[in-house]
Amino acid sequence: MDRAQLQFQNVEKYDLKLKSRPKDGVILQLHHTVRDSNGENRRIRFSSGIFNDLHEKLACADNIGNVFVLDFTDLKFWKLSNVGTCTALQFLPNKDDILIIASSKKYDINFLDIDSGETTLTLTGHTAPVKHVSFSNSKTNNLLTASPVEAILWERRNYTKYFTLNTYLGAQIQQIMFTPAGDYLVACFQNDTVQIWKNETMKSVKQIIPSELKHLKNIAFTMNGRAMAMAGLTPMLILFSMDTWKALKSINLTKHNISGAQQIAFIPQIFDGGANKILAILSSDCNLHLLDLECLNVIHSICPESSCIKRFVVSPTGKYFLCVLQLGEVNIYNSSYVMDLTQNFADIKKPCTSTQKLISQEISPSKAEVEQKMRICMDSARLRRILMQYGEYPDKFRSVIWRSLLNTPRNKSAYSSLIDKGIHPAYKDIEKQFTIHSSVTLKSLKRLLSCLAHWCPLFGVMKFLPAFVFPFVKVLQKDPLLLFECVATILLNYCQLWFEYAPFPPISILAIIENIVSDHDVHLLNHFCEIGITSQTYALKILETAFSEVLTCSEWLILWDHILSNEPAFIVMAVVSYNIVQRNAIKRLKTHEQLDNFYHMQNPIDKKHFLKKAYVLLNDTSEDIHPKRFFNSFISLDKGDCYQQFTGYPKATICMKLAKKSRKIKSQNDGSTLKEMTIKSQEKQINEILNKDEDNDEEKFNSDEENFNECIKNHNKHTYDLQDKGDFCIKQNMNTVAYPTTIHLQRNVEQTDTKSNRKDNICKHSTRLKTKKKCNDKRNDNLEKEVAKLIKTYTNSDLSDS
């Protein structure tokens, strides 16, 4: 008790003066300036703040471990020193003198007496900095503390852990809180989902996945808890009913010149019954906008001249709100003063007539003109600055931005000439290899692959190409010309050294990747070596699918935003970064099959850490093994009536592969080889002659002679036709022509033993036809002589040809 009194005596309080009826609504502005050892003034930045409306107090924390308490009733303020750097603040309900501080050191939660500065209670158990502290107003009376990776519920009676919610990589907590009535616990996750649990049982009652809203950042509740607002970095706001569990409306923020929302909160008003209609939105350009949800117009915008707004906090009753500026200052506003300003602006603002609307519509530029102006003003440096600030390009303008980055020429005539060649034979039956349910997507894929194969024969034999280009088809299929030129430019620049050993794996690029892994994470490479996994598994599988199998759609789009905005070597660094970021998951896999499956499935990943690591690798990799040492600088497609040739692959190898493929297709279409057809034809004719029934008359026998002679003539004709088709066909078909002839000669030798049998049969036949015996014997002798003469001539010519 003496210690508390001593500390209380050391806390000195100072007078506080507020502005009355300020023009901009700011009743107080906080600065914290100290003088260092050199006598120079140094400003200390404020990081967070929290209101206690019941006793009209405010606590603000700075970056060096001080907490300033402001009492608006007594108009006093004081400083609590050496509290430690805090990551979250919250007043204890129904107690005006206890402040909960989440410490960045050991991630403890401290209960601090604001009058004495004494810590009365400390809670431990978190593994990451606590960002959210919330109390339930229901009978359960729980305390919620949450970091991005876990949330803990504490019982208020003895502050023991009641429930722990753990998250996984890629689905970390963006925001979590109790509803105003305390019935539900609502969490907003990094994977753009909102999960709602029943507070008493922690049973999941609802999961919301807003398809229109991406990069969800913040949720907010009206004072009565009947409506919830959801917003993110995309210019879309969704209002959700907690009574019907259905969306009430979607509001397009671009109509109000708001590109996205970093933070949202309702500002309660007097006599609104808790159904708040004023929503404060901290936009992506760091300005605060007050949006009237009934009239759907921005009634006021706060844009401080000194600095942009970093974050804002609204008091529970809406009487005050504060803005933490990026320079470290804190502006405290009285809400009623700000609303008075909005009414004055509304009186000054004139309504827009129908004539003015018509004129504005007439002078508004078309979409093509807007895109043309965007291309002119968007150079790669500007686009890269946008990308570094927001992390990705907007979906609405992604195709225009990619076109600008790749500098596609829009060669309509050159593209038409490729289209006119039709579907390439290599991709005629592509639907048998891949299951594509959309006929439009299948048609676009066939058209793209055929154009690529007609442009360069290499792309008709690369088996991985359909899987590589498919995600680009899904994104850009509405503009086939842009789709082809984008993919062709990517193959020309970002796929360097991929095809130098085609159709075999790209040894050079895989060796570069292995060297980079060895330089930055030798333990991971040792793990691959122990299992016997090569870069063909942990690198080539990712490259051949353009990351589409290991990333979600949104992650894939963001990654390719960064790849196309950087030098061609960035894609190599992205492969290495993916493996290093997923190190812990990879080291748990011990077999080839497990690792093969790992690189063919979407695995949760922290995309920010993934991209950050890729940039680190790009900048920190030594020059000896850096890919840019081996890559050529970026070149775009030539503008004109034709595209430049694609080089950098072994043409002889590809030509042989194409020839082999065409022979295989030809043999499949024929059904049987020339050798088989010739043998079957000769055997059929000879067997017919040998097995003829000698009871047939003379006309039948003469007919056999004519058929046999015709067979020999036809075979000789077929042989000479083959020899006139050029050197390549002669080499391929020489054995095919000679082999049946050899078989024929062997059979003729064997037939010499059967001549006596034939004579015996002919004699038996002549005993029944005595009147024609002499005539038949004479004809048989003549036939045998003629056949022997023809066979001898045919054999000599065959041997001379061979």
Image (cartoon, rainbow, N blue to C red):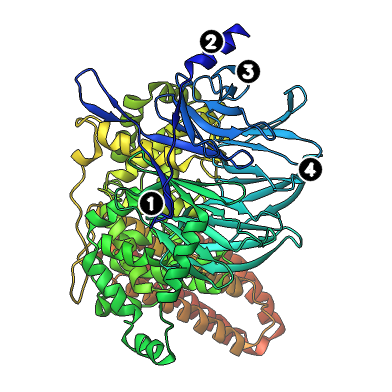
Q: Which residue is at the front of the view, 651 or 242? A: 242
Ranked by sequence position, the earlier of labels 4 and 3 is 3
Q: Is residue 726 above or below residue 121?
A: below
Answer whether residue 741 is visible to the viewer in this image.
no
Q: Which residue is at the front of the view, 158 or 736? A: 158
Q: Is disc 4 placed on a helix, strand or loop?
A: loop
Q: Is disc 2 placed on a helix, strand or loop?
A: helix
- Mark 1 sits on what residue? 390
- Mark 3 sits on what residue? 120
- Mark 4 sits on what residue? 203
Residue drawn 24% across and 63% down?
A: 378
Quadrant (top left, top right, bottom left, bottom right) of the N terminus? top right
Local packing at callout 3 (Cα closer than 10 Å; few below 14, some 14-19, many 20+) is: few
Residue 585, quarter of picture: top right
C-alpha separation, residue under disc 3 versus residue under disc 1: 42 Å
Local packing at callout 4 (Cα closer than 10 Å; few below 14, some 14-19, many 20+) is: few
Local packing at callout 2 (Cα closer than 10 Å; few below 14, some 14-19, many 20+) is: few
C-alpha separation, residue under disc 1 versus residue under disc 2: 50 Å
Looking at the rendered structure, the number of numbered marks drawn on it comes to: 4
Q: Nearer the viewer, mark 4 or mark 3?
A: 3
Is 161 left or right of 323, judged from the image as shown?
Answer: right
Residue drawn 62% across and 84% down?
A: 773
- Mark 2 sits on what residue? 6
Ranked by sequence position, the earlier of labels 1 and 4 is 4
Ranked by sequence position, the earlier of labels 2 and 3 is 2
Q: Amino acid at mark 3?
A: Thr
Q: Is residue 42 above or below residue 736?
A: above
Q: Is residue 155 above or below residue 707?
A: above
C-alpha separation, residue under disc 1 versus residue under disc 4: 36 Å
